[in-house]
Image (cartoon, rainbow, N blue to C red):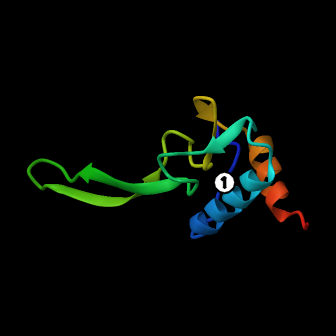
Amino acid sequence: MRGFYIPYGENDKHAEALKAGLARLPSNFTAELCGWCEGRGRYSQTYNAGCGMGYFSAMGGCERCKGAGLIQGDKPASASVIHQVLNAGDRDG
């Protein structure tokens, strides 16, 4: 299931928005930043280029948070939780 999508090229901006939102929520909030991708939804991964052709690195989607940037327990956070965190970061005051 894919409930949330980060637009192409917006990964760093998304991670900063998640950090700002989490900072405004209670410390015991149910979701946390993904430790694998640090909230970006992607990270550099190494792939096998094929039979004897070596390896290459490329950005790939995070398997832990399924590209959303947040986890809830040991699962990816739902889209509603992600929106809640993003909205908390947008609040003034």
Instruction: Tell me if residue 60 comes above or below residue 16 in the rendering.
Output: above
Residue 64 at what x, y percent from top left? 51, 39
Q: What element carries label 1?
A: loop
Q: Is residue 44 left or right of residue 64?
A: left
Specify few, some or many for label 1: CA neighbours under 10 Å numbering under 14, 14-19, or 20 or more.
few
Question: What's the residue at 14%, 55% (across, down)?
Answer: 54
Q: In this view, does 10 lie to the left or right of 53?
A: right
Quadrant including the C terminus: bottom right
Front in this rendered view, residue 24 or 13: 24
Residue 21 at what x, y percent from top left? 76, 56
Number of disc labels: 1
Q: Residue furthest left?
A: 52
Q: Which amino acid does label 1 sit on?
A: Tyr
Q: Which residue lies furthest to the front in this view?
A: 27
Question: What's the residue at 72%, 38% (across, down)?
Answer: 78
Question: What's the residue at 24%, 59% (across, down)?
Answer: 56
Quadrant including the N terminus: top right
Front in this rendered view, residue 48 or 44: 44
Front in this rendered view, residue 44 or 51: 44
Q: In which quarter of the image is residue 73?
A: top right
Residue at the disc numbered 1: 5
Q: Residue furthest right?
A: 93
Residue 63 at what x, y percent from top left? 48, 41
